[in-house]
Amino acid sequence: MLLYLGRRLLQLVPTLLGVTLVVFLLVRVSGDPTQLLLPETATPEDRAPSRRQHGLDQPLAVQYLRYVGDAARGDLGRSLVDGSPAIALVLERLPATIELTVAGMLIAVGVGIPVGVLSAIRRGSLLDRLAMIGVLTGQSMATFWVGILLILIFAVQLRWLPVSGRESWRHLVLPAVTLSLYMLPLLARMTRSSLLDVWRQDYVRTARAKGLRERTVIAKHMLRAALIPIVTVLGLQFGGALAGAIVTESVFAWPGVGTFVLDAVYKRDYPVVQAAVLVVATVYIVTNLLVDLLYGVLDPRIREP
Amino acid sequence: MTSWLNRASSIVFSRTPGWGCALVSAVAGVWLALAMAAPELGAQAKPEAERKVAVISDMGSMDPYRDNSSVGVEVQGHLFDPLVDYRGPDFTQTPLVAERWDNPDPSTWRFFLRKNIKFHDGKELTAEDVKFSLELAHAAPTANAKVASITEVTVVDKYTVVIKTAGPAASLLANLGWIYILPKADYQARGADAFSLKPIGSGPYKLERWDKGQRIVLAAFDGYWGGPKTPGRIVLRPISEPSTRLAEFLTGGVDLIQDLPVENVKQVRDSKDLQVVQSKGIRQIFFPLNTRADTPLKDRRVRQAINFAIDREAIVRDVLQGFGEPRTGPFGVRQMGYNAEAAKAAGYNPEKAKALLREAGFATGVDFTWNFCRGCWLKDAEIMETLANQLRAVGIRAKLNLIEVNQLLANQNTGTFQVGMIRWSRCYDSDTILAGIQAQSTTQKWSGSEELDKLIIKARQTLDKGAREKIYQEIYRVMVEDPGYIYVHAQDSVWGKRAVTDWSFQAFAGNTSLTLLYK
């Protein structure tokens, strides 16, 4: 296990290098940031010192090598907008995004898995059909639209919950529910599908033949085996939700990385965009590493050499 | 709901790791139920005399020489004071740090500072701070255009500063409204980075707290030379999504809302608790014509025809629903240099447009590409469609090219466009407008003429107000007769406020796009 963990951690390095290269090139395709940092009336002569100061007058390869070298020392550059260290700007907003993503995930798990299990148990029934229709509807609805609808109903009309911001746990409810709709449908469908696969296994038939109650067969024998693909999907969705929270954060004025990076993209604040993508990529990779390690807990066969 | 979740949990999960999921479900269910059943739980009582304002974005830095975003400048206008400013709907000249000033000669300005102005840390503001701030502005790409005419700054004594300019600089006072006085000792001791986060100014408000992306809290400065202002606290909440901003306003989450969507104005007006605050014609949308590229736009008659083909009244009435003012030239009615005669002569006249095109040899019409961006100004897409239709009626075929705003500006800065877009606010000093829109002509050379450039420089160097007004009226005539822009309209600024909130629009820094948030 330790060997496996060490190997996976080493794989982080080339993966992150690849991420830095892609995002480095992509942000530079968007254009010259000094066009926006300086007033619209700034001349090319006005922009030259700014370009020199930020190293933008150097060839791309030189810029990239300098960036990687600095990054290896923990320096991800300074924001072109306000001069603060880019990594600090991103990290101070990361907790809000993680809070929102985890809350959304908890709702998705808490609702999606039970729905999937019930659908599998009652497969073919009206309950199953209604559940899958509901799930498909949720998957088809745009996050942006759902968020605004929830605000209109629960905040404006009913006045049960606040509209936006991050001041108390009540502020987390609507954005977390909105974000959960991104993950919940797939979780529910995956749970149903995975359970139905396991349903047909010989050992499940044996368990029933031994006279065990259906509840015990499902909970003790089926669910654990069915959890492996569900955990895989959860890991992937966590990363997707982390990046996708940008829309939810915009709708609810949630002060996370998403809205901040969106603003940085518009302003072509290269260091901030690069730092944010690197941080999110790292969280994504580490999450999936934890998922892989969790397989060993769920299925002892994976632990065996 | 909670019992349903618990029942489902007990069916599905009976042991590790299922108990974890059950706990999660139960907690989630209880949390949701509590949240919905107890709307007042956790709510904080509103502090007295606090005003909450929903603004369109957060700011990048509290340092006025690093951040010139619209919200940034608005906040900075509360934290810092300049030497002198032009404020309110009529741009009243307002001495601030400087009590008075004189001109020993046309190129020399002597400013006499108020005594005992305190910074937020209690230290006194002196002439050294003024000199330091002007030097900072000179070195800052975001501000150096405002002090470009200044050649020397001398501290005469603790409360006297002498500024020398390269020739007479009629716009100096207006430009100084953008130059905030920062504390030299504190700035140098802590450095720009620290100052950006925790600024010290001499303005009526000090920064109490800045939770990035969430709120900026300003507290009234008790030691302000002009006396403490009300409200005692201003809380700015950056909310970029317009519908969310509106929802906060409708539910009482904020007292003021910036950029109230015009579709919701009637809803707000119909409410007895809410009011609309409208400021007329604050921002003109100029559509620059690239006269250097090899297109029909090089011909003055074609450019005149384009302007004659536009029915501005219809656009303001039907598309903007009255939230704007027509413009046939570079300045509006209340602006220095407005030329009523030239404005009237340049009004809607489609027959004249057709005649000019025939005269220019384009009887079959002309084609050009018109860059525009979405979300850049009020009803932008609708106005562009309407303009394209109006032009088509006289044989001018404008191909609308929707591109991202930053790319649009980049194209203009490099001269790679045919017709573009520049937004500029109504300002106290017309040179501020011309320096903004016509600077392109002296650098990128895609519009303008030697005659126009000479007039602009002459106006800049004429200190007499009456004579200056006449020069700007001449500039208006030149810019209409040889148009480097399509002139259409200036949009209004529309804010919403609670009826009980004692506030009205108060421009500062000589710019109608900016408003103070206190009385």
Image (cartoon, coloured by chain):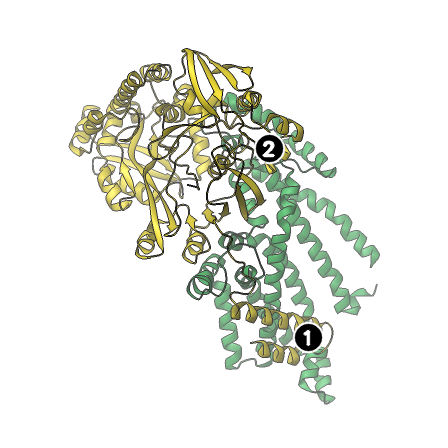
Chain colours: A green, B yellow
Q: Mark 2: give few (<14), some (14-19) or many (20+) Cα within 10 Å.
A: few
Please name whichever residue, B493 or A271, is drawn nearer the observer in this view of the structure: B493
Q: Tell me if A71 is positioned left or right of A57 in this view.
A: right
**Spatial distance from mark 2 to mark 1, Cα to Cα?**
68 Å
How far across and how far down the image is residue B99, in percent? 45, 23
Is residue A55 something that shows in the picture? no
Amino acid type, callout 2: Gly
Give the numbered dot on residue B122.
2
Task: Name the chain letter of the residue that bears numbered label 1.
Answer: A
Residue A119 higher or lower than A99, as above or below: below
How far across and how far down the image is residue A215, in percent? 67, 83
Dividing the picture into quadrants, the one containing residue B516 is top left
The quarter of the picture where the N terminus of chain B appears is bottom right
Amino acid type, callout 1: Leu
Residue topped by disc 1? A223
Is residue A290 something that shows in the picture? yes
